[in-house]
Amino acid sequence: MANETVTNFAAEAAGATPAMRQYFAAKEQYPDCLLFCRIGDFYELFYEDAILVSRLLQLTLTARDREKKQPMCGVPYHAAEVYLQKLLRMGYKIALLEQMEDPKLTKSVVRREVTRVLTPGTALDPTLGAEQSNYLASVAVLGAGAMQSCGVALLDLSTGEFRATEFAGSGGWAALVDELGRVRPVELLYGSGLLGGVNLAGESETAVGLDAIRTKTAVEEWVFTAEYAVPLVRNHFKVHSLDGMGLGGHEAAAVAAGALLHYMRATKQGGLEHVDGLRFYERSTCLELDAVSVRNLELVEPLFSGESAQTTLFYTMDACCTPMGKRLLRASLLRPASEMGEIEARLEAVGEAAGDLRRREDLRRSMDGLLDLERLLGRVALDSAGPREVMALAKTLGCLPGVVGAVRLFESARWRELGESVDPLEDLHEMIVRTIAEEPPVSIGDGGAIRVGVDPDLDELRELSRSGRQALAAIEERERERTGIGSLKVRFNNVFGYYLEVTKANAKAVPADYERKQTLVNAERFTTPELKEYETKILTAQERSGEIERRIFAELRRQLLEAAGRMRETARKIAEIDLLGCFGHLAALRGWVRPQVEMSGVLEFVQARHPVVERRMEESGGGRFVPNSVHLDADVGPAVLLITGPNMGGKSTYLRMAALLVVMAQMGSFVPAEGMRLGLVDRIYTRIGASDNVARGRSTFMVEMTETAAILNTATNRSLVLLDEMGRGTATYDGLSLAWATVEHLHDRIGARTLFATHYHELTLLADRLARLTNLRVTVKETAGGIVFLHTVEAGPASKSYGIEVARLAGLPSGVIARAREVLKVHERAETQQVREASPTEGVRMQMTMFTPLSQKIVDRLAEADVDGLTPRDALNLLAELQRELKG
Ligand SMILES: Nc1ncnc2c1ncn2[C@@H]1O[C@H](COP(=O)(O)OP(=O)(O)OP(=O)(O)O)[C@@H](O)[C@H]1O
């Protein structure tokens, strides 16, 4: 997010002090960044930056000059981190202009340079949840039209995960935007010409994609050329060809990745050692969920921001023990598998874990102490890990053999594979424990981080400074006796080094060989030649041991980073182990069953429950979820289920339940039902409820139609389509006609398994015409006191609508309810009349009459007219008459 600069820095620089000239030069170089300029113990901001930041962070705005022409605000250097993180979270970019020399040692002005640019996608956010990723994304578009290919690369610096993919053809851009909508990067890099050249909103109206990305950074266009970007990738990974990463023939993906690496360099991000691999991935290898469905189904985030995350499937299924497992769970929810073998292997492993409480609990307990291996490694690579964090890494590594042991007690193929292939990294654990002290200090500069026995020189120097300190204690004792001053103390500070301190009152008793160093209000400080000698000894010893500790620590860091690839591989395996354990745990705890997956068009579940709603009802003690069944078969049986029934009856819940169970099954999890048969689904489409896109300038109806268009244009007979209350956002007849035609198209042309919930009772008549459409209804019981929702779904169309009843339950004034009943009666009578008038032999026409009565009469007249027998005059008269009728 560029902050607009209005100050003319070139003009300001002309009469500026040397320090400010440095500032202006840096500002020119990084115009889209907030420039934090280090001056002494503060970071200062000037001009527009100062005005903006003082407002955003509630800082006091001052000025550098009397005339207040140079606004200024600042934050203390030591507390800067908090402020920087806040600004990054708001989407701003920050350049740090640091002092490159010790001000004490320079006579002229201190040299300053921008040492690092912090951006939302490159800075580590300490508040990031374990399951969340912090993606920096980059997009590259090569070619045009049918030859176009759109590449995207994603890097999570906190874990080192780096992957790329591309989408070819004219629909490539829309697919890419959709992918971004699902991944939700915090920052997006693009070629400076791109976002202007491609109509962002136009091609993909439905996309949650680009709008949601707060920080978009334009990079020079030439960076996105294959000649420049591809060699960057090759050089970074030290490979001759990108084929090994699966990137051969995927130039757009490689270019996006290269541009991303360029940006890391341009913003001076050090420590990319843990980014040791780049992986090409393909969306088609998983069950595709577009950004709209991910949102509608509340897979990982609640539908409306600000709502509790408890409505998400992620929350309901998160029983993972480790942060790696949580991240994999989240990723799997967004990309469930679509390959039979993979799903079966997982289900088998989950089944084994679910059936054996002892082994399962042993496994889960063995993962209890595991910290975030990937993030710790990330911190080591970025050189922000101190000795304590390295020790924490060791503790985590120390748990690995236990995990491996527990995994090996299982027998199914997937467990065996994992048990045999996971590297317990015992050598790395050993290496750290051998090097770092048991209870190390936070920072390496504090001393004492390296274990005794690692380096003889270090041990000797430590001994020296220790004996030196002992000698000082002895001096203190001796001098107290010699001078008779009981309160005499040997002390130390950074400015004066070691000194003898006596109170003012005792100053007279000081011997002649004491040399005065400093006078305070209540005390005098002295030194002696002997003290000086020890001081030099101790300080040099400390300095030298500090150097040795730093050297050893850096060497350890280097060795750890050399093994970064192994650690990341292990972290991946641990994530998988954790996830399978979690699924096993959930299956056993909640009585979920193994779905039967097959290559067919079937979707069938018996007595299924919506996992999230059921859990929430349990937690709030709000009754019991009523299980329901579904039977669909895209190949031979019913392909479209049309669900009618009152508001609040449970239609949406039923639809969502179907989709969630498919997602769960294809992730390899058991499902909340008595039984489930699932012919693998290639893609889930959802068109559910009103979207809040209105805020972004698109009408609800427009969004609904764009989403429906996407479904009708791309769904296959292996897809699952959910349509909830389609056509509501426009005039009743328009909406009904569109819904009608959509159902026909899905039924006749696509044959996708479809669940269609609607309030248009007229649609239930479609069952007479469409052989593979089945009517279902949610049931209610009418009692003397009103209606009771039973939430059971049964065969047949709903007999009547209960809108007014539901409105009464909602507390509409009784006068309004009574009047609504009257109006309804009038309308119902009129409608019945029209139905009677229509020819009973022509079923289709009768249905049409129900919602286009007027035009139908005209159509009938036209059909009856004997065109050959009409004179031109009669024809004109007929035309005039029909028009009159139309105009009413
Ligand atoms: N099978 C069920 N068992 C128990 N409660 C249920 C069940 N299905 C739905 N409910 C509850 O009933 C309420 C209404 O459900 P839902 O939103 O699915 O109804 P709807 O028919 O789609 O309503 P509308 O037409 O107004 O959108 C929700 O609070 C939901 O938790």
Image (cartoon, rainbow, N blue to C red):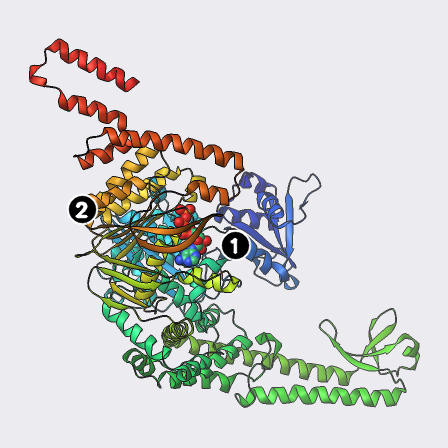
Q: Quadrant of residue 584?
A: bottom left
Of the pair 43 and 855, the residue shown nearer to us: 855
Instruction: State the residue at coordinates (76%, 87%).
Output: 473
Type of residue at label 2? Asp
Foreground residue, 689 or 770? Answer: 770
Left or right, 233 with reference to 498? left
Q: Position of residue 502 (x, y in %)?
A: 86, 78
Residue 160, can we see it? Answer: no
Which residue occupies the extreme left position in the image?
Answer: 868
Inspect the image, locate mark 1, and give the three-letter code of the amino acid beneath it: Leu
- State the residue position of label 1: 88
Occupied quadrant, residue 534? bottom right
Label 2 belongs to which residue?
748
Q: Work out whether residue 374 can be spotted.
A: yes
Residue 608 lies left or right of residue 130; in this view the side is left
Label 2 – label 1 distance at C-alpha: 52 Å
Contact check, label 2 and label 1, Cβ < 8 Å: no
Describe the element under mark 2 as helix, strand or loop.
helix
Residue 276 locus on image (x, y percent): 36, 69
Task: Estimate the x, y position of residue 651 in percent, counting from the top left.
Answer: 37, 51
- Answer few, some or many: residues within 10 Å of disc 1's Cα (few below 14, many 20 plus, some between 14 and 19): many
Q: Quadrant of the C terminus?
A: top left
